[in-house]
Image (cartoon, rainbow, N blue to C red):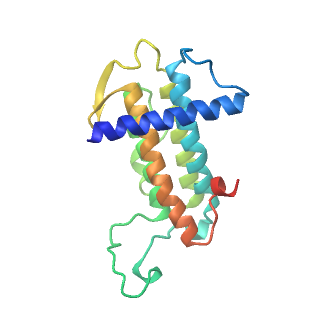
C-alpha cells in the first residue's frame, strides 16, 4: 500500500511539475520527448520549496512557537495535542528531512545537522530550511538517466535516487498542509493561496 501511494503521489506531483515548468517556460515538452530526470525531479522539489518557504516566511516571528491546543477548538471537542509540533518544529523538521532524504548523494552538509532541531527563532529556522533546499538541489543535480533508478542505501525503504527525491517532495507537501493550517489558525492567508 505504501509503495502504491508513493507511486501515485510521485506521478501526480511529477505531472504537476511538468505542467508548471511548461507554463513557466511558455510551452510544455513535446509529447514523447525524454526529459532529464534531474531537471524533472528538481522542478518537483522547486514547487514544494516555493510553497513551504513562502509559508515559513509568512508566519510572524512571534508566532513561531504556535501549536494547536485544545482551547482553539469547539467546546466538547477533545483532541490530543501533547506531541504536536510547533510551527518552528514544522520548519526545522523539513530542514532536517531534506538533509536526511538527500544524504544518499554523499555531499557533505555545510552545517551541524544536530543543531537544527534546537532552533527556536524564525530567522534561524528559515535559514536552515533554505540551506536544506540548496543541499537537496545539489543532490538532485547528480541524478542522471543512467543512475536515476539504480539502488542506493535505502531511505525509509525507498532505494533509488528518483523515488527518494519524489518521496521527499511528497513529505514536504504533507508538512506544508500542516503549516497552512497553522497559518490560517492565526488569521494568515498562505502566500500560495493569495495568488
Viewer-proximal residue among 160 and 107: 160
Q: Residue at x 59, y 56 (%)?
A: 55
Given the current orientation, which residue lies at the most extreme top position?
146
Viewer-proximal residue among 48 and 140: 48
* 137 shown above or below 100: above
Given the current orientation, which residue lies at the most extreme right position?
26
User: Residue 56 in the image: x percent, y percent?
Assistant: 58, 56
User: Residue 184 in the image: x percent, y percent?
Assistant: 57, 68
User: Residue 109 in the image: x percent, y percent?
Assistant: 46, 35
How many numbered dots are placed on residues in this image?
0
Left or right of 30? Residue 3 is left
Given the current orientation, which residue lies at the most extreme front position?
31
Residue 134 visible at all: no
Viewer-proximal residue among 3 and 142: 3
Q: Residue at x 51, y 59 (%)?
A: 179
User: Residue 65 in the image: x percent, y percent?
Assistant: 50, 69
Classify residue 170 by image quadrant. Answer: top left
Residue 100 visible at all: yes
Q: Residue at x 36, y 87 (%)?
A: 76
* 81 shown above or below 161: below
Amino acid at each position: 500500500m505504501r509503495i502504491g501511494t508513493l507511486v501515485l503521489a510521485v506521478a501526480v506531483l511529477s505531472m504537476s511539475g511538468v505542467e508548471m515548468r511548461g507554463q513557466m517556460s511558455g510551452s510544455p515538452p513535446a509529447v514523447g520527448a525524454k526529459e532529464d530526470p534531474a531537471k524533472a525531479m528538481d522542478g518537483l522539489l522547486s514547487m514544494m520549496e516555493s510553497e513551504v518557504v513562502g509559508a515559513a516566511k509568512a508566519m510572524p516571528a512571534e508566532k513561531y512557537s504556535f501549536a494547536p491546543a485544545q482551547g482553539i477548538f469547539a467546546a466538547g471537542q477533545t483532541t490530543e495535542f501533547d506531541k504536536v509540533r510547533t510551527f518552528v518544529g514544522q520548519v526545522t523538521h523539513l530542514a532536517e528531512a531534506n538533509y536526511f532524504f538527500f544524504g544518499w548523494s554523499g555531499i557533505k552538509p555545510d552545517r551541524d545537522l544536530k543543531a537544527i532541531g534546537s532552533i527556536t527563532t524564525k530567522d534561524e529556522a528559515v535559514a536552515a530550511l533554505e540551506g536544506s533546499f540548496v543541499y537537496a538541489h545539489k543532490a538532485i543535480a547528480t541524478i542522471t538517466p543512467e543512475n536515476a533508478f539504480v539502488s542506493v542505501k535505502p531511505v525509509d525503504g525507498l532505494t533509488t535516487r528518483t523515488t527518494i527525491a519524489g518521496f521527499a517532495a511528497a513529505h514536504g507537501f504533507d508538512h506544508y498542509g500542516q503549516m497552512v493550517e497553522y497559518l490560517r489558525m492565526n488569521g494568515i492567508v498562505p502566500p500560495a493561496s493569495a495568488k
